[in-house]
Amino acid sequence: MTPRTFARLLLLAALWGGSFLCMRIAVPVLGPVPLMASRVALATLLLGALALRVGQSFWPRRHWTEYLVLGVLNTALPFLLYAWAAQALSASLLSILNATAPIWGAIWGAVWLRQLPDLRTAAGLATGLAGVGLIVGVDPAAHDHAGLLAMAAGVAAPACYGLATTWLRTRSHGPAPAEAAHGSMFAATLVLLPLLPFASAPASLPGTVILAVLALGLLCTGFAYRLYFTLIEEAGPTRALTVTFLIPVFGVLWGHLLLGETLSARSFAGAAVVIAGTMLTTGFSLRALRRG
């Protein structure tokens, strides 16, 4: 892996880890629906502008079935679940739960596609789910009813990512990954904007909230998605996949430095178990990483 590729990988992990920080800052003021509608609308505008820059259409015109399903399952619904959970859970914890997305992909593949996991994948599934159980059992946020519901939402969000990925595998002629990102973000905007009249709006927004919304939509979503597909083209999917294991590192780091969040030793142990399970599930290895 070249220094330039590694720098891009770290930047992507920092941005996606920072998305949970931005949610924690903005969601208590804006609420889940306005925050996520703003997030996808800003990302759509940025991705559309980048599409125009390379001679493509601002509005995606093909594969609308795929865009709509991905816009709901891979964008609008998990974004809303994360935002709702962020009202009770820390950015650190949310970033750790996000690392279970590949585990859920393997579970959905076994249930829907009848692709039974091999021994290593099955061990990864069991390990990852045990890590989630460990975190839920020791985190103070899960000790009341509201906290348990927030924890369930934080687990359901990456489950949506896994379901969307599994559904896309059933499509024989789907869109290219970069087109899917743009199209699904546009579809998510169309889904979320009609919900805004039913959400309460604050009388004014602090500057920190405005900055968090702009960073979440433009940097942590629009730019980050573009960077992810650039990384895939440059280094291959195997190396790009390592961002899954780095996101919790930055999620915990930003939460600690900027919000004063702390995790207990048992929560750190649970995070390590989750990441180990994800590595086993995805078949990740340093040898495969070197081959790229």
Image (tube, rainbow, N blue to C red):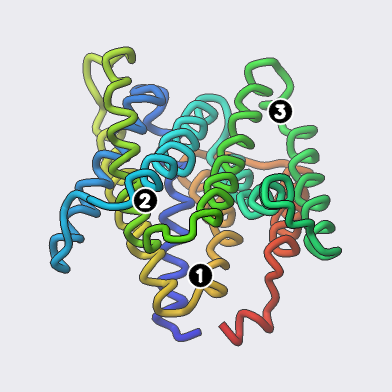
Q: Is residue 267 visible?
A: yes
Dot 2 surroundings within 10 Å: few (below 14), some, or many (20 or more)?
Answer: many
Q: Which residue is drawn at the image coordinates 59% and 48% (left, top)? A: 162
Secondary structure under tag 1 reads helix
Q: Which of the marked residues, 2 or 3, is nearer the chain's N terminus?
A: 3
Pick the front one: 185 or 285: 185
Q: What type is the residue that disc 3 sits on?
A: Pro
Residue under label 1, please give it: 240
Secondary structure under tag 3 reads helix
Residue under label 2, please give it: 220
* Side (left or right) of 46 relative to 3: left
* Side (left or right) of 1 relative to 263: left
Dot 1 surroundings within 10 Å: few (below 14), some, or many (20 or more)?
Answer: many
Q: Position of residue 116 (x, y in %)?
A: 79, 56
Residue under label 3, please give it: 140
Q: What type is the residue that disc 2 sits on?
A: Cys
Pick the front one: 211 or 165: 165
For residue 33, what is the image quadrant?
A: top left
Q: What type is the residue that disc 1 sits on?
A: Ala
Q: Which residue is drawn at the image coordinates 46% and 79% (left, top)? A: 235
